[in-house]
């Protein structure tokens, strides 16, 4: 059914259709609207005996999900930014225990300084914690990915993050085609856990493992992620047959067939990027775009199949590794060693990624390997000079905000 919905509401309605039995909630912007909507749905009795658990922190939210999932319940939670970091210990526990928890991450920058706007610093910081990470381009895809996430999580016995851009998607109103309960029930079978805490058949999970078997435990976790590289496109194909639209998968291209240069990105920036590709095509530039829907596990073979042989690849990053450079770029470089690779860091802390800025970045003569889109070099230079001149220059963020208020 087509409805004009806020992205958070669309996700909440879709999660409800997946019939979670335990929802653990702690508010943090910009994901709060999701768990608020689910609380109303639960209170209205639409989820039957679902237990909605208000907890005292994000760490408690995921810890409660771990206990509920281990006891055989289909579970859900959501978080963002510092909330995801507060969960870090529990993130590793959930994946290490092989628990099929689904969590929405409403992507938001990490402080300090405090910033509530969108980039991918939060989920990217947890790329090695053992969770599958899926990134939504639109609110329609964000909703669809939650149905697929439960199917993947429960087939593989692995936790899944569905990452959607905070505010840009979570608070945007768009037309979303919500499935019926009957469609979701037909696609997503009742949860049958692979491991279950049962008083009548007691076992220990998460027990101590020493050097004699820990390497093998970690290898098996890696093997399950490699299996996910086969399951993710299979689930996306099955979803398309069931619902009549394509969502999810590993990686997809836009006008890449005859492109010399392809720009690779994740998330909602793809809409703007595709417009820029169309405009550059009109001027004769052989440019294409690609979106990486699955970031963990990293789909190296699928990326080579799509972009192998391309002369130039530009990775548009919404986060970066301080002191090193692009995060996604490192994986792309390993997958495409023969391509001329550039990294463009864009949209940090919610800065708009405009068509004009992308045009400048993609048509620049002799660009550097690492570019920060729309970086105010004058503002940075003033702060660096201030730091060199004074023993106590004060907080850089405050200094630069004053400089901007005074006209730069």
Image: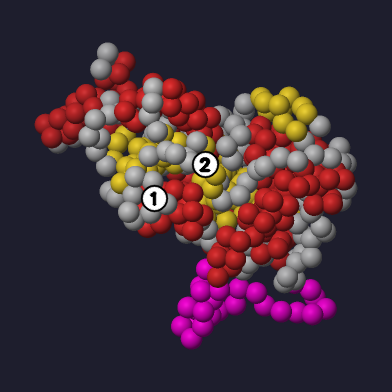
**Picture quarter containing residue 189?**
bottom right
Q: Residue at x 50, y 30 (%)?
A: 274
The residue indicated by pointer 1 is: 309
* Circle 2 SS class: strand
Q: Is residue 357 visible?
A: yes
Q: How many marks?
A: 2
Q: Which mark is residue 253?
A: 2
Task: Using residue 155 as the reference point, say whether residue 253 is left or right of it.
Answer: left
User: Looking at the image, is 83 positioned above or below residue 169?
Assistant: below
Task: State the residue lying farthest toward the left.
Answer: 389
User: Local crowd at mark 2 within 10 Å, few (<14), some, or many (≥20)?
Assistant: some
Magenta span has 211?
A: yes
User: Local crowd at mark 1 within 10 Å, few (<14), some, or many (≥20)?
Assistant: few
Task: Using residue 345 as the reference point, say whether residue 107 is left or right of it.
Answer: right
Q: Residue at x 47, y 57 (%)?
A: 300
The picture places residue 27, in percent across and down from the top left corner, at 62, 39
Quadrant, the N terminus: top right
Q: Nearer the viewer, residue 127 or 202?
A: 127
Q: Which mark is residue 125?
A: none
The prevailing secondary structure element of the residues shown in magenta is: loop
Earlier-in-chain disc, 2 versus 1: 2
Magenta span has 243?
A: no
Q: Is residue 399 visible?
A: no
- Mark in front: 2 vs 1: 1
Q: Residue at x 48, y 86 (%)?
A: 212
Q: Nearer the viewer, residue 162 or 279?
A: 279
**Picture quarter containing residue 286?**
top left
The picture places residue 235, in percent across and down from the top left corner, at 69, 54
Please report the bounds of the magenta region as a residue range. 197-222
The picture places residue 137, in percent across and down from the top left corner, at 57, 37
* Circle 1 SS class: loop
CB of mark 2 within 8 Å of CB of mark 1? Answer: no
């Amino acid at each position: 059914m087509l409805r004009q919905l806020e992205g958070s509401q669309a996700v909440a309605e879709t999660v409800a259709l997946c019939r979670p039995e335990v929802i653990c909630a702690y508010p943090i912007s910009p994901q709060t609207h999701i768990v608020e909507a689910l609380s109303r749905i639960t209170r209205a009795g639409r989820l039957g005996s679902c237990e909605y658990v208000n907890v005292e922190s994000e760490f408690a939210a995921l810890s409660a999900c771990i206990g509920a999932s281990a006891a055989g319940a289909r579970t859900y939670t959501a978080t963002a930014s510092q909330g995801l970091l507060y969960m870090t210990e529990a993130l590793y526990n959930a994946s290490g225990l092989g628990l099929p928890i689904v969590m929405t991450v409403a992507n938001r920058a990490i402080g300090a300084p405090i910033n509530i706007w969108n980039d991918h610093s939060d989920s990217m910081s947890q790329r090695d914690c053992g969770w599958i990470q899926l990134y939504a381009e639109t609110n329609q895809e964000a909703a669809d990915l939650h149905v697929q996430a439960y199917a993947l999580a429960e087939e593989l016995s692995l936790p899944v993050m569905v990452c959607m851009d905070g505010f840009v998607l979570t608070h945007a109103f768009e037309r979303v085609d919500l499935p019926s309960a009957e469609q979701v029930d037909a696609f997503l079978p009742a949860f049958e856990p692979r491991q279950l805490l049962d008083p009548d058949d007691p076992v220990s999970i998460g027990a101590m493992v020493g050097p004699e078997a820990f390497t093998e435990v970690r290898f098996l976790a890696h093997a399950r992620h490699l299996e996910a590289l086969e399951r993710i496109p299979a689930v996306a194909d099955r979803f398309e047959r069931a619902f009549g639209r394509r969502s999810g998968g590993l990686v997809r291209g836009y006008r890449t067939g005859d492109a010399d240069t392809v720009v690779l990105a994740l998330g909602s920036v793809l809409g703007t990027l595709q417009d820029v590709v169309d405009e550059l095509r009109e001027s004769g530039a052989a440019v294409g775009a690609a979106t990486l829907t699955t970031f963990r596990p990293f789909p190296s073979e699928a990326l080579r199949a799509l972009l192998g042989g391309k002369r130039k690849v530009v990775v548009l990053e919404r986060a970066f590794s301080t002191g090193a450079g692009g995060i996604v770029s490192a994986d792309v470089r390993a997958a495409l060693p023969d391509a001329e690779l550039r990294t463009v860091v864009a949209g940090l802390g919610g800065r708009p990624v405009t068509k004009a800025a992308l045009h400048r970045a993609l048509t620049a003569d002799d660009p550097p390997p690492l570019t920060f889109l729309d970086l105010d070099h004058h503002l940075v230079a003033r702060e660096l000079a201030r730091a060199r001149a004074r023993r106590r220059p004060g907080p850089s963020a405050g200094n630069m905000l004053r400089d901007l208020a005074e006209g730069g």
